[in-house]
Amino acid sequence: MEELELIASMSEQEMDAALKHLEHAFQKIRAGRASTSMVQDVMVEYYGAPTPLSQVANVNVPDAMTISIQPWDKSAIGAIEKAIINSNLGFAPSNNGENIILNVPPLTEERRRELAKQAKSEAEASKIVVRNARQEGMKELRKLENVSEDLIKDQESKIQELTDKFVKMCDDHFKVKEAEIMKV
């Protein structure tokens, strides 16, 4: 039955999207090492339009504790600095007229615990989305008419297997991120 397969594949797509969202959220949670992903969501007011930082400057990581931002247009350096301060990332940018340097301070034990807690809540939110996708799929299966109960039961167990798989993947991603955060 095509409808049955479609419902299962829609559920799987929603679960996969939840996992991708979790991976993106984890990229933003810093683990004590400098990374360009820490500033990827910074929007700079450039010629009157909010523009992603990566489109107005070269962002790189010269060492584990430093992010270097080199604007392509030197006149944008002030706007970039302002955008970083306003983004509440907790960095104090230093500007030497040529580029902006962000020093990533080492994490305190307390901050590591906060970040691990934040990562856990992101993982839990993703697992909720996965379970909601399962619930939605099951609801759609029950709405179908003129389909044998055996076929519906088979699809329900398939959706449950997908759910278990994606919940486990969320947990695995969290364990890796938590270890990364807590590592000194």
Image (tube, grey):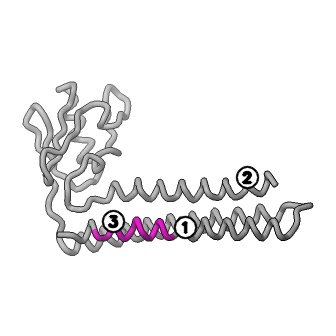
Residue carrying label 3: 177
Q: Note whether 56 is above or below 142 in the view shown.
A: above
Residue carrying label 1: 165
- The residue positioned 23% from the left and 47% from the top of the image is 85
* SS at mark 3 in the image: helix
Percent x, y for residue 45?
32, 34
Residue carrying label 2: 6
Q: How many marks?
A: 3
Q: Residues within 10 Å of mark 3 (few under 14, many from 20)?
A: many
Residue closest to the eye, 93 or 10: 10
Going by the numbered disc 1, the residue's amino acid type is: Lys
Going by the numbered disc 3, the residue's amino acid type is: Lys
> Which quadrant holds residue 56?
top left
| First to last magenta residue range | 168-179
Q: Identify the mark nearer the N-term, 3 or 1.
A: 1
Q: CA distance from mark 2 to mark 3?
A: 33 Å
Of the two numbered discs 3 and 1 in the rendering, the one whose residue sits closer to the viewer: 1
* SS at mark 1 in the image: helix
Percent x, y for residue 30?
27, 59
